[in-house]
Amino acid sequence: MIRKTIKKEIKELFRDGRVRISIFIVLLLLGVAVWISSRQYQNTNQDYAAARLSEREVWDNQGEKNPHSAAHYGTYAFKPKYPLSLVDQGVDKYAGTSIFLEAHKRNEAQFSAATDQTGLSRFGDLTPDFILLFIMPLFIVLLGYNSFTKERELGTHSLLKSAGARGWKIVLGKWIALFLPVLAITTSLLLLAGIVLSNLPDYGVFQWSSLVAMGLVYLLYYAVFTNLVLWVSHWAKRSGISLVVSLSLWIVACLAAPKAASNIAEARHPYPTRQEFAANVLKDKEAGLDGHNPWNKEAKLLEEQVLAEHGVDSLHQLPFNFNAYRMQKGEEHEAEVYFKQYNYLKEQYQKQSGTYRSLALLSPFLPARFLSMGIAHTDYATHWDFSDAAENYRIATQKFLNDNTAQNTKYGERGYKASADFWKQLPAFDYDPPCLDKVLENNSSNLMILGMWTVLSFILLFISTKKI
Amino acid sequence: MFRYNFKYESIALLRSKWIQILIVILLLLFGFATYNGQQKTFKRQADIIEANAEIADADRDMLKLLDSVEQGFQVSASSWTIPNAPMAVGNYHPRLASMPPSDLSFLATGQSDMFTHFVKPTASGDDLALNFTEMTSPVQLLFGSFDIAFVVIFLLPLLIIAFSYDVLSSERESGSLRLLAAQPISLYKWLFQKLGLRFFWVAVIMTLSLTLVFLLNQVAIGSNFAAFMGFLAITLAYALFWFALAFAVNLWVGSSGKNAVALLGLWVVFVLLIPAVLNQLGGTLYPMPSRGLMINDMRAIKAEATQRQDEILDNYLRDHPEYAVNDTTQKRSFWHRYMASQQLVKKELEPILIRYERQLEKQQLLLNRFTWVSPAIVVQGSLNQMAGNGNKSYKSYREQVIAFAQEWRNHFLPMLYNNQEFRSENYAQLPKFTFQRPTYQSQSSALFVVLCSALIVLGIGALRFRIYSKKEQSLVNQ
């Protein structure tokens, strides 16, 4: 019975002109999207490699210079693009790509692609994730809305009944028939992406396991939609009503809920404005040690403490340059201030994520979106991870520079310059995004919500269709 | 016949709860969107007021400190922050350059969630250090805002599609079309009237619910009456376009299922695909140069300027003898050298930075040339403009701030090079910033474009009438 239903449904689907056209359009769009994204990916990575190399050269060839001047001159950390961004661009367009690493200050990532585009970019891009997340569910709605209603409208419903068909068998047959084209399209897209990626010359971190995980997330997401659409089709009396209701589900899940969630999250847990943030940092900084200012209250305390520790009574007797030592201590205090203030941002973001999760109960789109971005390393969490890594590197760099001054100069000595080949000793900034296991662990609640959606929608479908 | 059609269709719409559902849905959608938009606007205003208050506080402290210094008292501030040095005022007491929201800012978030609305340019900072982006979670930028523009551009067409995709085909499928064909009215006219009536109801409900929702959310409709009417006009024209599409699809396509697929396909094309493709096209034809490589260039220029600071200062004073005429001390501090080389860096950076604005302009021009391809783009541009949150506003703001930053810097340079002190009486002369809204093109061209698209689509629908005018039967039997 199941096999016969599948066969009949598939045959019927492919006879229908609208289905053939829809499949053709979806495949065409996917092809174009993959092509555009892979070009973009290659361009971005070339620029990234060039910028990184050139910046390191600038750093290495500073010549003789005072280490603290070099610290102010600073260096840049550039964010690479990861292979699976080919499939899901995530928030990459809206997150900055380079961070300026200088003395005394933690800077935010700058120059996001969206700020360099016209207002049109806010409509979205023709990327594979757009098709996977928005168009495919719409495709399921269009293919499946009349799955049951047509039986009623054509009168075959009573034939089925009289043939003694079991409800779950018919449903399962219809389910598989509806899911097969979706499965075929998704698999072929991911395969295509996988082949493109493994043939790129510098695909380095690309792993098939991530791609498979991503594919599974999408399949779960589509299973939810398939369940809901079939359920609506079974419940509705007419095809028209079924279409309008399924369409409304799609609108709410994919269009309205994410936007509403973003508004609610922002209203409940707002970020400070850039100016407020800067003011808070300044206030905290002023309350502590200022590395440049020996008359600062905290600086005086530090002086007394160091003198007592070394059992000497003047700064000149110390085995190192106290000015550089104070500079380093000031740097540590500032790093703490930034740690605190950025942690506040992170907390706000965590709370916002909580809002998104609670609204995910209204929309399977949200967990799928977050999981897909997470696996592709294009989500906000990866961006945070990168910016934290850059900050750790900045702190280490400051210590490296201040220690050099402290060891090579005496207290009160001015005009010290480190030798020209000293700069090369600073290790290069290197960042590896979290591995797949870690990403899945961090996104476990999203996984759970998506899983819950899948299970509950299956139960809903099979319980309500016990009798056809 | 028109009277009967109007009357009985209206009754049918009421009985099928179509009108009631539409009222509830539109009130909810517009209400939520307006509330969100107004909250954002209020926050933006409050932020600017707070930032201004902070500056007023800081200024009071500065004047107090300045007064003490002028009276010869010992003060307990770090030496380089004491405001009798012009550079201390220029760097530690910047003015606020803010961009307040317009009255209709809530209509469209536009770029306002991405860019900041107040910056404080300092005398020593360069133009690149002015960060015009706001601190926002990129997730929010990705998802966008639930604003009036979203409801109008994305959701309104879907509502229209849901209520009109089967106007003709459902009559055919239920068999009542045969009865209708026996009436003394042409089917085309009947269909036109039927859809026209639906448009009429949508227009009435939209106008009333928008007015109600705006009034409830304290929107100053009275003082922005012309803009409000402009907004209604473009929104209704956009709705008309979608009704026209439904009319054409009903005539040309056929069964309910096919109509639905065709209309949704057209929705995807107009609202999602064309904007995305145009955006991509702009980016491909006029690609933005890499920001990473820009950083490399900037670093090289700065590094060179730092090494040649003394030389640069000499050249600079030779070029600007007026700066040093009144200076008898010939004192040269860090700032003398730094500001001179900063001016040079600015000059050399300018062509690099301008490339970005130029490319963006070119992309915008390309877009303007093709905007008519999709009414969704026209409406988006138009609403962004009414809200004052479009790219043009932010570009203008950036330019005004950069000009102001230069004015601010220039205000202190003569004092610096003449080794003059900043005094209390100089405070009143500090330059101030007021944002001038850019002049926009009139809304009527946008309205014209949308109306034209609607008419063209109606024409395409009516074309079937001309081609098959003898065979009206084909509509019934199909």
Image (cartoon, grey):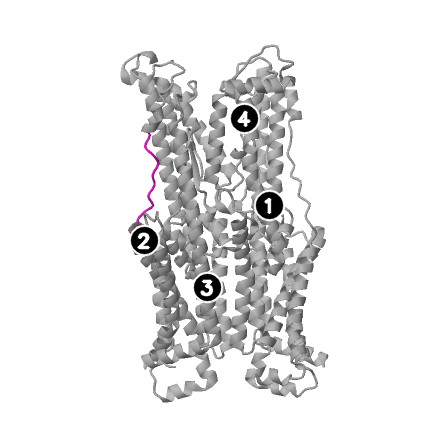
- Do marks 3 and 4 share a subunit? no
Does residue A430 belong to the magenta stretch? yes
Q: Quadrant of the N terminus of chain A?
A: bottom left
Q: CA distance from mark 1 to mark 2?
A: 42 Å
N-terminal of the pair, mark 4 or mark 1, is: 4
Whether the residues at callouts 1 and 2 have beta carbons within 8 Å, the answer is no
Dot 1 falls on a residue whose secondary structure is helix
Q: Residues within 10 Å of mark 4 (few under 14, many from 20)?
A: many
The residue beneath circle 4 is B342
Q: Quadrant of the C terminus of chain A?
A: bottom left
Q: CA distance from mark 3 to mark 4?
A: 52 Å
The disc at residue A28 is 3
Query: Where residue A116 sits in the image (x, y, percent)?
Result: 53, 45
The residue beneath circle 2 is A440
Query: Where residue B234 sits in the image (x, y, percent)?
Result: 66, 59
Q: In this view, which residue lies farthest toward the top?
A: B328
Looking at the image, which residue is at 50% across and 67% down? A248
Identify the image quadrant of residue A329: top left
Task: Indicate the chain on which mark 1 is placed.
Answer: B
Query: Where residue B344 sits in the image (x, y, percent)?
Result: 55, 26
Does residue B370 belong to the magenta stretch? no
Looking at the image, is mark 3 or mark 2 nearer the viewer? 3
The residue beneath circle 1 is B361
